[in-house]
């Protein structure tokens, strides 16, 4: 039986957006505006459609780098999966920081911060230029010797987590606030209030 992850992911994330909208109405929190949500989703749909072509290209690039230029040949086992998890998280941090501190990085990332709303639809607001830029950063992983299949798997998993940080309906998460990017941390990151600029 063939398992279609995209066929599951789209209704799951759309359902979570609908659920967040429902709870925002129940809690009387105005966190959705129709025009903003449509703009966010349109940008996200465009990027996802382009991903159908670029994902295969990224896999090919990662595989080519690992085969021809990889410093090591890393085999998949529980230790290398854990190492790749931490390496992915480390690279994601620097990729995101570069996106905020270097002009060309901000040029491809700024669209994600332009929504007036802050809800799950904002997580979709990513351009194809940002995903292309992300590929450049991830090229270090096949150079180190990680196989393309492992890298692509973690990009999908690691790329899904930020979706859950784009909400105003989840408060502080106790001890998790000390070592994870939580919704409350990411709200500060997206905030345009003068008191929060450059804080996170």
Image (cartoon, rainbow, N blue to C red):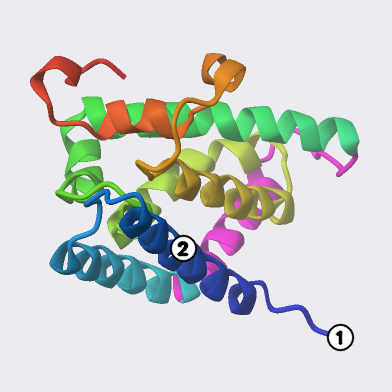
Q: Position of residue 133 (x, y in %)?
A: 36, 47
Q: Is residue 70 above or below residue 100?
A: below
The residue carrying mark 1 is 1
Q: Residue furthest left?
A: 194
Could you tell whether 108 is left or right of 175 in the image? left
Can you see residue 9? Answer: yes
Q: Residue at x 63, y 55 (%)?
A: 152
Could you tell whether 171 is left or right of 24 in the image? right
- Quarter location, residue 83: top right
Can you see residue 123? Answer: no
Q: Residue furthest right?
A: 77
- Quarter location, residue 76: top right
Tell me which segment is drawn in magenta: 53-77
Residue 73 on the magenta span:
yes
Q: Main secondary structure of the magenta part?
A: helix
Q: Position of residue 88 (x, y in %)?
A: 60, 35
* Numbered disc 1: secondary structure: loop
Answer with mark 1 or mark 2, whichever residue precedes in sequence: 1
Dot 2 alpha-carbon crowd within 10 angstroms: few under 14, some 14 to 19, many 20 or more: few
Spatial CA span between label 1 and label 2 = 30 Å
Q: Is residue 111 above or below residue 198?
A: below
Residue 29 on the magenta span:
no
* Numbered disc 2: secondary structure: helix
Quadrant containing the N terminus in the rendered view:
bottom right
The residue carrying mark 2 is 19
Q: Residue at x 49, y 62 (%)?
A: 16
């Amino acid at each position: 039986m063939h398992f279609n992850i995209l066929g599951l992911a789209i209704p799951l994330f759309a359902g979570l957006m609908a659920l967040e909208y429902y709870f925002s109405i129940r809690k009387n929190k105005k966190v959705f505006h129709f025009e903003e949500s449509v703009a966010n989703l349109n940008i996200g749909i465009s990027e996802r459609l382009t991903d159908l072509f670029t994902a295969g290209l990224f896999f090919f690039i990662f595989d080519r780098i690992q085969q021809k230029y990889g410093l090591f040949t890393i085999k998949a086992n529980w230790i290398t999966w854990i190492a790749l998890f931490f390496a992915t998280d480390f690279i994601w941090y620097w990729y995101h920081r570069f996106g905020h501190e270097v002009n060309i990085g901000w040029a491809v990332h700024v669209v994600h911060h332009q929504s007036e709303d802050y809800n799950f639809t904002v997580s979709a607001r990513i351009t194809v230029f940002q995903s292309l830029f992300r590929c450049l950063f991830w090229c270090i992983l096949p150079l180190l010797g990680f196989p393309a299949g492992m890298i692509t798997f973690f990009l999908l998993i690691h790329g899904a987590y930020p979706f859950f940080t784009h909400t105003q309906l989840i408060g502080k998460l106790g001890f998790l606030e000390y070592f994870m990017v939580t919704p409350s941390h990411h709200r500060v990151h997206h905030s345009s209030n003068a008191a929060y600029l450059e804080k996170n």
